[in-house]
Amino acid sequence: IINVLKIKFQRGSRKMKMIFLTPNRGWSMRTVESLVRGEYFLSFTGVLRTVREAVESNQDMDMNFDISPAAHLSFFIVKLLFIDFQANEFKYINHSCNPRAHLHGVSSFTRQNIDAYSEITFDYYKPGDKFRFDCMCGGYACRGIKGVI
């Protein structure tokens, strides 16, 4: 079963996705076909580096994600995913405080059923992150907008 899953993730999802320009958050991704809760839809391809390699390279990166060594890696050096010009369409998934998808290792899965032509989003940050974030998602539980929406 593990080999079958590995092959599926390497091939990627066959569900169609579309890149589109949002009014205030830049480029984003939406699904052309409906997705069901828990469905795999995309794996990250790009640069996978250790924290030390990232500091030494000193390159500008759009974003980065901690990857749990226990989840997918067979070694115990903490690595980061760096989203830059080398990344695939994964780089177009926008943040939302009410995400429709989640990241597990380097693969993305839906958190809920997603209707066709709905934007695919996930929460870039986890509780305890210590940096400022200007969120533009506009969701009912948005952490980046103060006061009445």
Image (cartoon, rainbow, N blue to C red):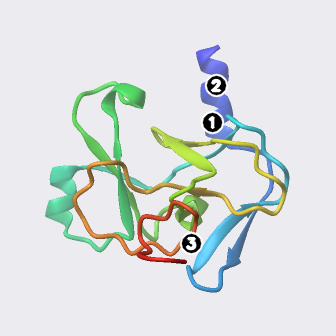
Measured as percent of width and height from the top left, residue 108 is found at 58, 44
Compared to residue 114, the image places residue 62 above or below, namely: below
* Label at residue 138: 3
Q: Are marks 2 and 1 in contact (CB under 8 Å)?
A: yes
Could you tell me which secondary element the residue under label 3 belongs to? loop
Q: Which residue is the site of mark 1? A: 9
Residue at x 51% of width, y 52% of height:
45
Residue that appears at 50% across and 75% down: 136
Residue located farthest toward the top when viewing the structure as drawn: 1
Residue at 58%, 84% in the rendered image: 24
Residue 129 horizontal side relative to residue 138, left or right: left
Sequence-wise first label, 3 or 2:
2
Tell me the quarter of the image containing the N terminus. top right
Where is mark 2, residue-wise?
Answer: 5
Horizontally, is 31 left or right of 21 in the view?
Answer: right
Mark-to-mark CA distance, 3 and 1: 32 Å
